[in-house]
Amino acid sequence: MRILHTMIRCGDLDRSIDFYTNVLGMQLLRRKDYPEGKFTLAFVGYGDESEQAAIELTYNWGVDSYEMGSGFGHVAIEVDDAYAACDEIKRRGGTVTREAGPMKGGTTVIAFVCDPDGYKIELIQKKS
């Protein structure tokens, strides 16, 4: 067994695809409209879905925002250098909500950014 994808709903699909591809450096893996169901799915990730998990962006036609709720935490991405990743994300127009630094009570270097819909993404620096 393996994790295939994580689904999140977005209010503006093109804006979300732009964030995940141009700010976080993922690729648009596939996109398909479902006219009868009135929704569009787009899958983004860092590699082929046969080898890596992806994020499924779900756009329900006519819905432009969602309530976050209290159950969702974040999506985590491993990076080589969290400090450099934050600088690059800001340069590309992304929002860093917690600058890179050691996690509270630990030594692992982390940072947090938000996507256009407010979903939190944790950057975890690869241990050397």
Image: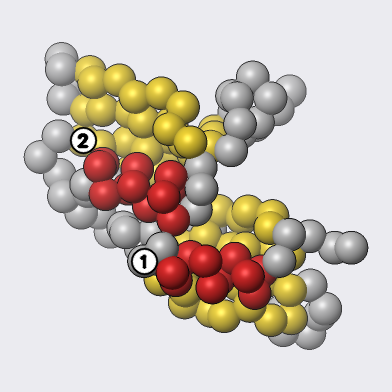
Instruction: Establish if 56 lies above or below 82.
Output: above
Instruction: Establish if 76 lies above or below 83.
Output: above
Residue farthest bottom in this picture: 105
Residue 29 as seen in the image, left or right of residue 59: right
Could you tell me which secondary element the residue under label 2 belongs to? strand
Residue 64 as seen in the image, left or right of residue 91: left
Percent position (x, y) of residue 91? 44, 69
Q: Residue at x 41, y 63 (%)?
A: 92
Residue under numbered circle 1 = 93
Q: Amino acid at mark 1?
A: Gly
Q: Amino acid at mark 2?
A: Asn
Number of marks in picture: 2
Could you say which is closer to the camera, residue 57 or residue 127? 127
Instruction: Establish if 59 lies above or below 37.
Output: below
Checking the image for residue 55, the label placed there is: none
Checking the image for residue 60, the label placed there is: 2
Could you say which is closer to the camera, residue 20 or residue 65? 20
